[in-house]
Amino acid sequence: MANLNARRHERIDTPRGEPDSRPVSNAAARDKFRQYLIKKGLRVTNQRLAIFDAAFERKEHFTAEQLLDYARALDDSVSRATVYRTLPIMTESALLREVDIGTGEKFYHPATGESTQVAQVVCVDCDKIFEISAPFMEWYGSTVSSKLGLTPVSQRLQVSAQCDAFRRTGNCPRRG
Ligand SMILES: [Zn+2]
């Protein structure tokens, strides 16, 4: 277990190249976002919708600063403050999942909606974050907790990994 954190100091820059296998209905998610804004007493502005669209266009994980760039490409009036105010709204409403891989910078990813139990495998060689459906986690968490008379509130599994292909050949197709 000690090795899991051994390479966390490595900076993860831009995760990229992740195959998109999400059966996401962006229209449904966009609708949920609008409703959530209204419920929170917030206006549905073009800037907020641009942030949503920019986030849901992404196939890879992104940071808040990257999202600012993406959203500004859609609407150049989007401000940094609006991005930083909108991100928590999107995570609270479970539209985006926040991923903390211990580098100090948070990453975001559209939530799949299919499974709430997701594990992350972080490739420290190729700056990649993989989201893996992990239904066994729910079972495991509730089993070990109930033995202690506890009910799980949240749990997460994160694996830091090295890239076999890169270590062997100095090359990896997942690198940009
Ligand atoms: Zn690799």
Image (cartoon, rainbow, N blue to C red):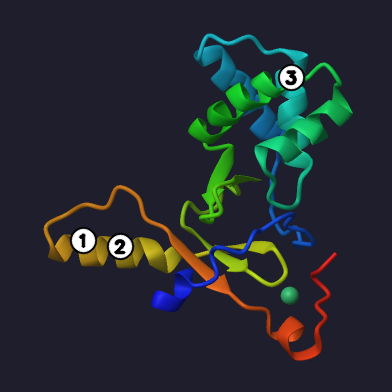
Q: Residue 107: x and y, percent? A: 61, 47
Judging depth in this view, the residue of 70 and 150 nearest the camera is: 70
**Ligand 1 has an atom within 8 Å of the beta carbon of the residue at disc 1:** no
Residues packed near mark 1 inside 10 Å, few (<14), some (14 to 19) or many (20 plus): some
Q: Return the disc, 3 or 1, that comes first in the chain's sequence.
A: 3
- Per the image, label 2 sits on a secondary structure element best described as helix
Residue 141 tag number? 2
Q: Quadrant of the C terminus?
A: bottom right
Distance between the alpha carbons at the discs numbered 1 and 2: 6 Å
168 on left or right of 106? right
Identify the residue position indicated by label 3 in the image. Answer: 79
Residues packed near mark 2 inside 10 Å, few (<14), some (14 to 19) or many (20 plus): some
101 on left or right of 27? left
- Per the image, label 1 sits on a secondary structure element best described as helix
* Residue furthest to the bottom: 168
Residue 128 tag number? none
- Which amino acid, by three-letter code, is at mark 2? Gly
Q: Residue at x 52, y 37 (%)?
A: 94
Residue 75 in view (yes/no): yes
Labels 1 and 2 touching (C-beta < 8 A): yes
Please identify the quarter of the rendering in which residue 129 is found: bottom right
Distance between the alpha carbons at the discs numbered 3 and 1: 44 Å
Residue 145 tag number? 1
Q: Residue 173: x and y, percent? A: 83, 75
Judging depth in this view, the residue of 23 and 151 nearest the camera is: 151
- Which amino acid, by three-letter code, is at mark 1? Ser
Q: Return the disc, 2 or 3, that comes first in the chain's sequence.
A: 3
Q: Is residue 66 above or below residue 171?
A: above
Q: Is residue 34 above or below residue 26?
A: above
- Per the image, label 3 sits on a secondary structure element best described as loop
Labels 3 and 1 touching (C-beta < 8 A): no
